[in-house]
Amino acid sequence: MRFVLSTVGTSILTNQIRNDDPSGWRRLLRDSANRHVEELDSETVTVIDTLGDRALEKLLQEDSQLNRRISAELNGIYGIYNGKLPQNGPDQHCLICTDTAQGQKTGELVEDFLKEHGVSVSSYTPEGLSTKDTAAFTIGIKDLIRWLEENVPWRRDSGYHVIFNLVGGFKSLQGYMNTFGAFYADEVIYIFEAETADLITIPRLPIQIDTTVIEEHVTEFALMDAGKLYPRRGVKDIPETLLEFIDEADDQTYAGLSAWGTLIWNRAKSDLLAKRLLPFPRLEYAKTFRDDFNDENDPKARLKLQETLAKVTYMLEESNGNLTPLRQDRGLQFERFMTVDGIYKFRITQAVRVSCTVADGGLILRHYGGHDYVYGNP
C-alpha cells in the first residue's frame, strides 16, 4: 500500500496558454498567483476559467502522454505507476494545494481527474499557504507540519509506503517538502525533464534528532507549541534556528517555535512527554494525580494529557489566572462538578477527564483517568 502526497503547482494552467492568446495572460497569472478568488478581477477570473476548461478538455481525451505533459503533478503520479493509473486499489493520494485561487483551481482539476479514474484521493490546503510574503508562507508551513504529523506517522505504522511526489508545486514549497520528506517519507520523487521522464528517487535517510536541547527545555517547548511566546532573553539557550522572533508593540522581542522548531518538536515530543510529568506554571499536582499519571502506561495517552496541560497553562498565563477562557473552550469543557462543591473537571479526550480545584490563579489537579473513574473519585 502507498500513501502518495503530491505538491500542486499551476503548470496545468500555464501549459494551456497558446501563442495566439493575448500577451498579457501570463502576466495576469503571475500577478494573481497569491490571491484568493474574492481578490480577483473579472478579467483574471475569465482567464483562469478558460485555461481550466482547456485543461479539462485535454484530460478527457484519455491520453496519458498528453496528461503527463500538461500536469507536473500527474506526471509524477503516472511515473510512480509506470505510466498507468491504478484503479480502485488500496493506495491513498493527497494533494497539497496553496491557499490561492489558482492553487484551488489546479487542485480541483487534478483531484476530479484522479477520482474519475478510480484513484482514492483527497486534497489539503494549509491555512494561508502562499508565496505572498514570508509571514503568510511561514503560517502555511506550520499548518502543513501539523497536518503531516497528524496524517503521516500512523499510516507508516499501519504499513503504508509513504511517497512525497514533488514533481509539481512551487520551488519554495518543494525546498521545505524535501526536508520534511527526510522525516516523514519513505522516498521522495522527482522526474527528469526529458523524453524518458525517468523517476529520480531519494530514499529515506537514517536521520537521528539530537534532543539534548529539547530535553533541557521541554516545558518551554511544550508551552511554545501551545502558543506561548517568551521574551527573547528567556530562551537564550535555545538555538535560534528553532525559534521565530516577533517584535511586539511594547518594543520587546518575543520568541515562539519556528517551522523547523515545530518540526523537530513534533518528531521528539512523543518520547519526551511520555517519560515524566512536566512542571507547568499555575498547575500543582496532588499525590493522587501523580499516582494516576504513573499508572497510565499508554505513551499516547500521556502525550495527549501533557499537551492538554500545556494548553491549560498557556490559557491561564494569558488570562492571569482568569478561568473564563477555560470555560469558553469547547474542547476542554471546563466546568464545575454538579455533585461536589469546589471541584472542577475538564476534558482530555472524549472518554478521559481531569478533576481539579482552583487556587491562587491556578489549578490543583486531583485525579486523571476515564470518565467513570474521575466522576467516582473527583
Image (cartoon, rainbow, N blue to C red):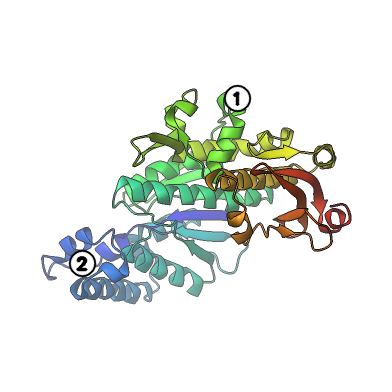
At horizontal 56% and vertical 25% (from top left) the residue drawn is 213
| Tag 2: amino acid | Ile
Q: Where is residue 170 in the image (x, y as percent from the top left)?
A: 33, 51
Quarter location, residue 286: top right
Q: In the rendered image, is residue 199 in sight?
A: no
Q: In this view, does 295 lie above or below 37?
A: above
Residue 45, horizontal then vertical, whole percent: 25, 73
Q: Tell me if 223 is positioned left or right of 62 in this view.
A: right
Secondary structure category for the residue under label 2: loop
Looking at the image, can residue 122 be seen?
A: yes
Per the image, the residue denoted by label 2 is 17
Q: Nearer the viewer, residue 201 or 125?
A: 125
Above or below residue 199? Residue 281 is above
Label 2 neighbourhood size at 10 Å, few (<14), some (14-19), many (20+)?
A: some
In the rendered view of the protein, which quadrant contains the N terminus?
A: bottom right
In the image, 100: left or right of 269? left
Residue at 81% across, 47% down: 367
Q: Disc 1 designates what residue?
A: 216
What amino acid type should be assigned to the residue bearing mark 1? Glu
Q: Residue furthest right?
A: 376
Q: Is residue 320 above or below residue 151?
A: above
- CA separation in Å, label 1 and label 2: 55 Å
